[in-house]
C-alpha cells in the first residue's frame, strides 16, 4: 500500500497542528485552565457554606423545640402544684433556678448560631463576588481564545482545502489511525522505521523488521503506538 498520500497529508497537517498546540499553550489558555480549577473550588466552598448554614438552622429549630418544652415545664407551674409549705417554696425555687439556667443555655446557643449565620452570610456574599469576577474573566478569555482559533482557521483555509482533497485518496482506516494518534497528541503519527528503531520514541524494536519488508509496509510501535513505516 502506498503511503505517499497520508504522508503528504501529515506534512501539511503538522503546520496546523503546531499552531493549534501554540494556541493551547497560549497565556489565555493557561489562565483559563487555572480559572476553571478555581471556579470549581469556589463552587465547592459555597456548597460547604450552604451545608453549614443548614446545620445551624436545624440547631436553631431544635432550640425552639426546647424552649417550647420548657414553657410547659410542670416543675415551675405554681398554680398547678400549689405552694402550701416552706418545703414547697424551696423546691420551687430550685426548679426555677434550674429552669432559668436552661433558658440561658438555650439563649447562648441561639445567639451563637445567629452570629455564625451572619458570618456565613457575609462569607457567601464574598465568595459569590469572587465567583462572578472569575466567571467574567473566564468569559473574556474564552472570547479571545475563540477569536484566535477562528483566525487560525481562516489563516489555514487553503491548507484545509488541500487536506480535504487528499482525504479522498487515503484509505479510511489509515486516516482513522492518524486521527486517533493526533487526538492523543502523538505527532507526527506516521514515522519511519530506521536502523531497527522507531524514529519518534527511539525504541529499538528489531522484531518489527520482520513485518516491514517492502516500502509502504506499516506496523505499530509497541512503545509509543505510532505507525511505523519502511521508507
Ligand atoms: Zn515509538
Image (spheres, rainbow, N blue to C red):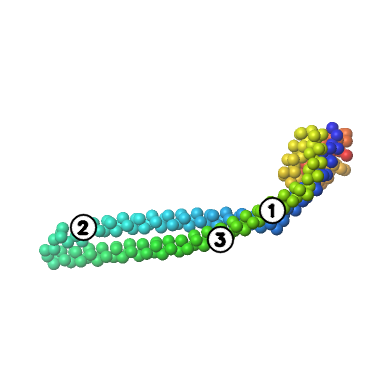
**Is residue 100 in view?**
yes
The answer for how far apart the CA atoms under marks 3 and 1 are is: 22 Å
Q: Where is residue 102 in the image (x, y as percent from the top left)?
A: 29, 63
The answer for how far apart the CA atoms under marks 2 and 1 are is: 73 Å
Q: Position of residue 191 (x, y in %)?
A: 82, 42
Residue situated in front as seen by the camera: 88 or 164:
164
Q: What element carries label 1?
A: helix
For marks 3 and 1, the one nearer the N-term is: 3
Residue positioned 31% across, 55% down in the render: 65
- Residue of label 3: 130
- Residue of label 2: 74
Q: Which mark is residue 182?
A: none
For marks 3 and 2, the one nearer the N-term is: 2
How many callouts does the rendering have?
3
Residue positioned 42% across, 55% down in the render: 55
- Residue of label 1: 145
Image position of 216 with respect to 45: above or below: above
Amino acid at each position: 500500500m502506498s503511503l505517499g498520500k497520508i504522508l503528504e497529508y501529515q506534512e501539511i497537517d503538522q503546520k496546523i497542528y503546531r499552531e493549534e498546540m501554540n494556541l493551547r499553550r497560549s497565556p489565555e489558555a493557561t489562565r483559563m485552565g487555572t480559572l476553571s480549577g478555581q471556579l470549581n473550588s469556589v463552587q465547592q466552598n459555597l456548597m460547604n457554606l450552604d451545608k453549614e448554614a443548614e446545620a445551624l438552622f436545624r440547631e436553631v429549630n431544635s432550640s425552639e423545640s426546647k424552649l417550647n418544652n420548657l414553657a410547659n415545664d410542670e416543675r415551675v407551674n405554681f398554680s398547678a402544684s400549689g405552694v402550701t409549705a416552706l418545703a414547697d417554696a424551696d423546691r420551687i425555687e430550685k426548679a426555677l433556678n434550674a429552669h432559668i439556667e436552661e433558658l440561658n443555655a438555650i439563649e447562648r446557643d441561639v445567639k451563637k448560631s445567629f452570629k455564625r449565620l451572619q458570618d456565613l452570610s457575609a462569607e457567601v456574599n464574598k465568595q459569590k463576588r469572587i465567583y462572578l469576577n472569575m466567571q467574567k474573566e473566564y468569559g473574556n478569555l474564552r472570547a479571545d481564545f475563540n477569536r484566535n482559533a477562528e483566525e487560525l482557521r481562516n489563516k489555514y483555509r487553503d491548507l484545509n482545502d488541500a487536506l480535504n482533497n487528499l482525504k479522498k485518496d487515503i484509505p479510511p482506516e489509515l486516516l482513522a489511525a492518524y486521527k486517533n494518534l493526533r487526538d492523543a497528541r502523538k505527532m507526527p503519527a506516521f514515522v519511519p522505521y530506521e536502523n531497527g528503531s522507531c524514529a519518534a520514541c527511539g525504541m529499538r524494536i528489531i522484531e518489527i523488521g520482520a513485518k516491514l519488508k517492502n516500502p509502504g509496509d506499516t506496523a505499530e510501535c509497541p512503545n509509543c503506538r505510532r505507525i511505523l513505516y519502511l521508507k
